[in-house]
Image (cartoon, grey):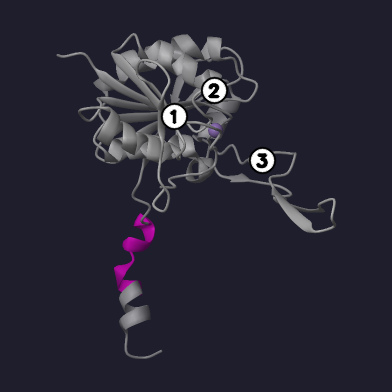
Amino acid sequence: MSKRLILLTNDDGLWAPGLATLARVASRFGRVVAVAPDRNRSAISSALSLHNILRLHALGEDRYACDGTPVDCVLLGCRSVLDRVPDWVLSGINHGLNLGEDVFYSGTVAAAFEGRLQGARAAAFSIHPKGDLAEAEPWLERFLARWEAMDLPTNRIWNLNFPKGEPAGFRLCGQDSRQYHDVVEKRADPRGTPYFWIGGDSGPTYARGKGSDAEAVFEGWISTTPLHLDLSCQETLGRSGAFEQTFNGGDS
Ligand code: MN
């Protein structure tokens, strides 16, 4: 097998320490090319720059800063920087957890999905805000040494979250659900004009449901969650009779 081609990105920006850890570990598995945002683009999900130009700045061998989003970075990486679809697209390591519904907002997770859509094996990595990248590093290496032995179907990615402290191991788990508090704050600027700030100080509360990613991480495990892009609701699709009667039936 020829040397693996590995595309790296994140949503915290090219200079984030988590990307450096990811690059160091990934380089043991192939040629690593990093294409990452030139600034923090967290919580930008799958945003795509369709109405402005993109610039790519080469900052050394196989290292590029882009003024676009994480998904832009993956697209530019796969379609322009590299001469073929990479074998792996790795996103992270994000500074902060991506658990439960966080995955919908996360640029880290979105970049992994984009990598998968482009045809690569893809994963997103995040770490507890008080986590230690040095403690996560050997576990990241272990995951990357083994993940090719477990294929995921089309449009699926792995979403991993490293806990605070030395991990107990990997735990296969689903998505939790969470609540944010004091989500929108209204303040006044020095001229008295109101402005708004999204995100309170207290952070999210996770339900920590049984078998969930949040339960795993807060019990000290590495949450290891297979995600898929198909958001259709299987329970409701199984109720086609009720649907027909409700929406296409004669009487209302
Ligand atoms: Mn981030």
Mark yes or no: residue 202 visible.
Answer: yes
As measured in the structure, the alpha-carbon distance from the residue carrying label 3 to the one carrying label 2 is: 26 Å
Q: Is mark 2 within 8 Å of ligand 1?
A: yes
| Outermost residue toward the bottom in this view | 251
Write down the residue under mark 1: 36
Q: Amino acid at mark 2?
A: Ala
Q: What residue appears at the point 57 percent right and 22 percent down from the top-left corner? A: 163
Q: Amino acid at mark 1?
A: Ala
Mark whose residue sits in front, 3 or 2: 2
Mark closer to the chain start, 1 or 3: 1
The residue range painted magenta reads 233-242
Mark 1 burial class by Cα count in 10 Å: few <14, some 14-19, many 20+: many
| Outermost residue toward the left in this view | 1
Mark 3 burial class by Cα count in 10 Å: few <14, some 14-19, many 20+: few
User: Quarter containing ligand 1?
Assistant: top right
As displayed, is residue 118 above or below residue 135? Answer: below
